[in-house]
Amino acid sequence: MQSNQVRILVIDHEESNSLGKMLQSKNYETIVVTSINEALKTLLQEAFAVIVIHELLNTETTKVFACGKSWLQTPIIFIANANDFINFDPEIGICDFIMKPINPVLVQGKVNVFVEIYKKQRELERKQLFLEHKLSLLQGSYKELEEKVDEKTQENHRLKNEILHMDRLQKVGEIAAGIAHEIRNPMTTVLGFLQLSVRGTVQQTPKNIIHLMIDELTRANSIISEYLNLAKIQEFHVHEVDLNKVITAIHPLIQAEAILSEKNVILQLEENCFIMIDDKEIRQLILNLSLNGLEAMEANGNLLVRTYVERDEVVLVVQDEGVGIEEKIMDKISTPFFTTKENGTGLGLAICYQIAEHHNATIEVETSKKGTSFFVRFPRVK
């Protein structure tokens, strides 16, 4: 049975038990036995800081102790005559030797040293067990935390997608009037020519008129397709795209809003602007920046949408001729729900910054009283 009390074992065949009495101390408990067999029985039940053997120095003794794995690392102090140490080759672990006559101070000193070492070892073992227990608890907590982080990451991803979709729907609502106006124009043109044909005003519809009607219907169809595409939910999918084609595809929607508010949209597109993007998200980014620019300008203002290549980057520029952004709010424009508009949601620019981050792109802003320019820098496909 193990105990918290520190013990030493004294093996002394002398009936006087003088050695056992010498080694009595308040720092440890002294157990005295008179034979090797009795000592082995005791060692199987208790742990000892040190074993002191008096005048039993022989090969059989050392062999017996060498077989005991449980106490193999227990220090042993042999006390014997000088002649007994000649040709003695112990097969056990830690040994010390004291020659007779016995010097009590020396014996007590060595025993005290081994006792202190034993105490330190036990303290280290307790600390190690404590640390292992704490480590086990931390590992369990870490696993739980990891699972919660994964769960929150998935939830965050889902919420971001919902916000993106809500922002798209908001933009769809904002440009609905412009879309209706842009679709009504080609439909009126086609309707007029068809009415002329039905009334017999023209005997045969000229080919150029037919081509004009086809062009008008095609234009109306492209506007409707892009309008519906903007509101559709899609998974994030990156592939190599010419940025200019994305701008050209979204241009009718921007142009429709510009015409409705009596403003102009100018495209300056440089060749070879290939980047790795999700064109669905980039459409939304371009539309958000463009609508913000149109809203910032008075009638007859010009919105410039430009692309160019600069070293290893493809740069998208959306530049308006508004009054600029106040310096005191420049560091807040990317903050979700921050807005200076009376009916704004504060999501437009925040969504743009999030989309840019998805594509390893950066957004830079230059503003003055003559207008604001947004520079979106994408890594270029080489």
Image (cartoon, rainbow, N blue to C red):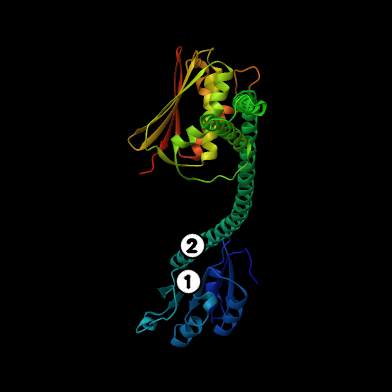
Q: Is residue 310 left or right of residue 60?
A: left
- Quickly name the residue at label 1: 75
Q: Position of residue 72 (x, y in %)?
A: 50, 76
For disc 1, the neighbor class at 10 Å (few under 14, some 14 to 19, many from 20) is many
Secondary element at tag 2 = helix
Secondary element at tag 1 = loop
Count of numbered circles on the image = 2
Contact check, label 1 and label 2, Cβ < 8 Å: yes
The answer to which quarter of the image holds residue 177 is top right
Of residues 169 and 43, the one drawn nearer to the viewer in this rendering: 169
Label 1, label 2: how many angstroms apart (C-alpha)?
10 Å
Of residues 1 and 232, the one drawn nearer to the viewer in this rendering: 232
Q: Position of residue 191 (x, y in %)?
A: 64, 27
At a point 54% along the width and 32% down the height, the residue shown is 215
Q: Amino acid at mark 2?
A: Ile
In the displayed structure, 221 sits above or below 131; it is above
The answer to which quarter of the image holds residue 224 is top right
Q: Is residue 135 visible?
A: yes
- Quickly name the residue at label 2: 117
Between disc 1 and disc 2, whose residue precedes? 1
